[in-house]
Amino acid sequence: MENKKIQSGEEDEINDSPIEQVRLTIPITDDPTLPTFTFRTWVLGPITCAALAFVQQFFDYRQNPIAVSSSCFKMLLFVLGKFMAATLPSNPVKVPGTKWTFSMNPGPFNIKEHVVVSILATTGLEVPFGTTVMGIRRIFYHKYLNFWIGLLMIMTSQILGYGFAGIFMKFLVYNPYMWYPFTLFDISFFRSLHEVEERPKRGITKLQIFVMATVASFAYATLPGYIFPSLGALSVICWFWKNSVIAQQIGFGRHGLGVGSFSLDLSAISGALVFPLSTVVSLSIGTLLLLYVITPIAYWTNSSNARLFPFSSTQLFDQSGQVYNVSKVINDNDLTFNQKAYEEEVWQQFKHEYDSSRKSTEDVHNRLMKKYKRVPQWWFLTILISAIGLAILSCEGFGKQLQLPYWGILLACLLALIFILPVGVLQATTGQTLSLNVISELLIGYIYPGRPIANMVFKLYGLNIQSYALEFISELKMAHYLKIAPKSMFIAQINGTIISSLVGYATSWWLLSSVENICVPERLPKGSPWTCPGMNYTYAASIVWGAIGPQRIYFPNGQYSKQFYFFLIGLISPLIIWGASKFLPEKEWIKNINISNLFGGTSSLPVYGVANFWSWTIVGILYNLIVYRNYKDWWASYNYVLAYGLC
C-alpha cells in the first residue's frame, strides 16, 4: 500500500502508517460516540481486578502457581459485558442527593469499553514485586517489616513509573515509527470479538479461528503440562544415551545445551508468530554464538572451576558445588555483610530506530486522535513528586528498616530516566525489552555493598519505574490505535494499579502471618503446597549482589572478574554496527542487526530451557519467510488472532 501524503496545516501528514504490519492490522477509522467509562466499566473492572490480584498473590506462595492467561479474562469480560448489555435496564438512574444521573446500560458493549475495562481488570494479574521483598526479609532474613513501611514501599514502587511515562509520550506514543508488535497482537483479538465479520465462502472468520485455536491449545496443554511433561523438552541424544552424563549435558533441553532437543509446548511457540523476522534472527544468532561457542569452551576447559556446578541452574552454589548457605556471611542483627566470615568461607577473587523516534512526521492515527484531550502534564508531575516523597519517607522513616538511604531512591529514578527511552524504542520496534534487573543490582551492589535488603529495594524501584512506565506507554499506544481517549486509559491504569497493589499486599501480609513455616519447605508438613518457589531466585540474587557484593564475586577481586570484558563488548558492538551501516549503506541487512537482541537471547535459557528456544526459532523463521512474505492477506486477517488463541 502506497503512503499518500496530504496537507494538514503546516505539516505533511502520512495518510496511513509507515509500518506495513500496522497498515495491515489497524483500521484508519474512528467512532467518537462510543463510551468508555460506563456503569459496566466500574462494576466489572474493579471487582475482576481485585479477584485476580487475590488469586495471583495467593498462589504465588504455592508450589504450583496458577498461570492465568489475560486472554481468558478478556474473553470473560466480553461475555459479562454482553450479558449486562442484554439484561440491564437503560433508564436513567439518579444519584441520591445530587443532580447526577447515569445509565446502567448506555448501549451495546463496545470495543473501546472492553479495552478500558480489560486494562483495569488485568492489572490484577501482576504480583507486586514489593511483596516478594517483604516476604524474603521476613522469611529468609527473619526480620519483621512494619506494616506501613511495606504499604508505602509497594504503592510508591507501583505508581512511580506512571509519573515518568509522561516525559516520553511524545517519542514513544505519538511517533508513528514506534509501532509495538505485541500491541497489534492485542488489538487483533479485540477486533475479532467486536467487529461483525461475514464468513467468507469456504472460509472462517477471525473469531472462529481464535475459538478453535484457544480450544485446541487448552486441550493440548494438558499433555505437556500434566500428562506428559517430557513434551516440553524432547531430546534425541538423551533417548539414545540415557546413562551418560556428558550426553545429558549436551542434549538435555532444560538444563543442558539442548543439541537435538525441541519442545512441543504451544506456549513456547506461539510468541514466534508475533515477532518480525529481524528480531527472530538477531535473537537466534546471539543465542547460538553464546550457547554453542562460548559456553562449551568455558565449561569444558573448566574456566573458573565451571565443571563443579550444574550446567544450567537458577540456584546459587558455593565453591564446592553445594547450595550456598548465606547465614555464614550475614550478621544476624542488622542483615549486613560479615567480611570476616566471608574471608573464612570463600577465597578472594540502536541507531536506526533512535533516529526515527525523533522524526516529527504524523500519520492518520495522530490526526484522528487530535479530537481527544491528552493527559495534562501536571497529572504526571503530581504522581512523580508525591511518589518520590513517600518512597523516601518509607526508606528514611520507621527506623530505616529498608536499609536504603534517600539518595538510593533518587538514583533509582535517575537510572530509570536514562533507560526508559532506549529500551522503549527497542520494545516499540522489535517487540523485545531489556530489564534493569541485573543492572540495578550491580550498580547498588558496588555503591552500597553488604546490604541485601537495600539491594532488593533499589532493584524494586529501578525495575518497577521502567517496567510500569513502558507498560503504560504501550497501552497508551493501543488506545492511540483504537482511538480511546488518553485520559480514560490513564484513569483505568492508575485505578487498576492501586486496587491490585492493595489487595496483593493485604493477601501477602495475611498469608505470611497465618501460615506457619510458610516458604520453609524443611519445616512444612509433608505435601504442603506453601513452598514459595518463586522467592528463591530473588533471595539468591540478594545474596550475590547485596550481601556479598559484586566486587567480591566479579570485578575487581572476584573469581569471575573476566566477565566484565562483556561490558566493553556491549559498549563497542553498537558502534561497529553503526560504522558498518554508514560505510556500506547499500547493505540493508546491517541496519537490522540489533545488539541488544543479539546478546540478550540467552537470558531466559536457565529458566525456560534450550528446547523452547529451538522450537521458537524454527517456527519464527519459517513463519516469517513463508506465511508473511507469500500470504499477506491471510496473515493480516488471522496471524495475531491465531497467536493470541495459542498462547
Image: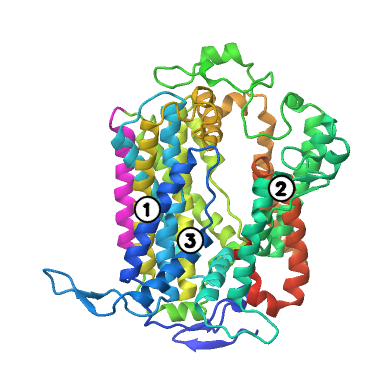
Residue at the (31%, 36%) spot, across then down: 149
Q: Left or right: 259 with respect to 21?
A: right
Residue at the (46%, 52%) spot, across then down: 125
Q: Left or right: 340 with respect to 274?
A: left
Amino acid at circle 3: Phe
**Whether residue 579 is visible:** no
**Whether residue 117 is visible:** yes
Residue at numbered disc 1: 50
Q: How many marks?
A: 3
Magenta range: 377-399
State the separation of the CA atoms marked 2 and 3.
25 Å
Residue 510 picture location, percent across and down: 35, 37
State the separation of the CA atoms marked 3 and 1.
13 Å
Residue at numbered disc 2: 232
User: How many residues crowd around disc 1 within 10 Å: few (fewer than 14), some, or many (20 or more)?
Assistant: many
Q: Quadrant of residue 134?
A: top left
Q: As rendered, which of 646 and 369 lies closer to the eye? A: 646
Q: Left or right: 474 with respect to 287?
A: left
Residue 112 picture location, percent across and down: 42, 74
User: Judging from the image, what secondary structure is the residue with disc 3 in?
Assistant: helix
Magenta span: chief secondary structure? helix
User: How many residues crowd around disc 3 within 10 Å: few (fewer than 14), some, or many (20 or more)?
Assistant: some
Residue 286 picture location, percent across and down: 73, 49
